[in-house]
Amino acid sequence: MKPLHTAALLAIAIMTLLALLCGSCKQKGCTDKNAYNYNSTADEDDGTCLYCKTTSTPWGSTEETLNDMNYDNGNNPFYNDSIVRLTFVITSTTFNDPQCGINSHNTSLIIQNLTAKTVSFNAAFSLAGCGYGSKIYAISVPPNGSINLGLIISVPTSIYCGPPTVDSTVPINFTYN
């Protein structure tokens, strides 16, 4: 047998053996599409799947009452009365891994009308000392009713801010129906 022919046969045998061995190899990894470390090329789960876990922790609430300070030449029957009660509900949201989200403090707002008339007004809300918020909301609350504006401000926990409040740069003018 010629040496070239023998080398060729040996190369074919080695390639066939490698193909057989690697063809039956399974790539290990996370095979769950719901895991954030899902490996689309893995065909054997190796138990390394990682999942996002979110924890919401109540931090408490603060209340603020808004009075109607528009005298309107003595024509405002609600002048200096308490018109609405604002309840700011604060929660902390944390994630088990940075890939899942940013840890944050979240403020939601519930507005209660303290009058027997529908109250409408524009207002902005912010967190004292850091400038987060200040979106202007057009608000209308039914007589003696309440509305939930839901999430109004979300701030990363790495930023320190004071309590939520009404943004004093936006004048509040109540209208009644």
Image (cartoon, helix red, strand yellow):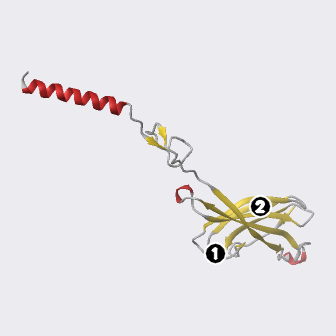
Seen at 81% across and 58% down, the residue is 147
The quarter in which the N terminus is drawn is top left
Seen at 82% across and 75% down, the residue is 70
Outermost residue toward the front?
1
In the rendered view, would you say 44 is above or below 85?
A: above
Front label number (2 vs 1):
1
Residue at numbered disc 2:
139
Amino acid at circle 2: Ile
> Left or right: where does residue 41 sit relative to residue 88?
left
Q: Position of residue 66 (x, y in %)?
A: 81, 73
Outermost residue toward the left?
2
- Examine the image and state in which quarter residue 154 appears: bottom right
- Quote the CA–CA distance across marks 2 and 1: 25 Å
Q: Position of residue 26 (x, y in %)?
A: 42, 36
> Left or right: where does residue 123 sit relative to residue 76?
left
N-terminal of the two: label 2 or label 1? 2
Amino acid at circle 1: Cys
Seen at 61% across and 73% down, the residue is 131
- Which of the two residues, 137 or 35, is positioned nearer the viewer here? 35
Name the secondary structure under disc 1. Answer: loop
In the rendered view, would you say 33 is above or below 146?
A: above
Q: Where is residue 129 in the image (x, y as percent from the top left)?
A: 63, 78
- Which of the two residues, 174 or 26, is positioned nearer the viewer here? 26
Residue at numbered disc 1:
161
- Which of the two residues, 6 or 63, is positioned nearer the viewer here? 6
- Examine the image and state in which quarter residue 27 appears: top left
Q: Position of residue 97 (x, y in %)?
A: 55, 58
- Examine the image and state in which quarter residue 72 appears: bottom right
In the rendered view, would you say 89 is above or below 27?
A: below
Residue density around tag 2, few if under 14, some if 14–19, many if 20 or more, within 10 Å = some
> Left or right: where does residue 172 sit relative to residue 113?
left
In the rendered view, would you say 71 is above or below 57?
A: below
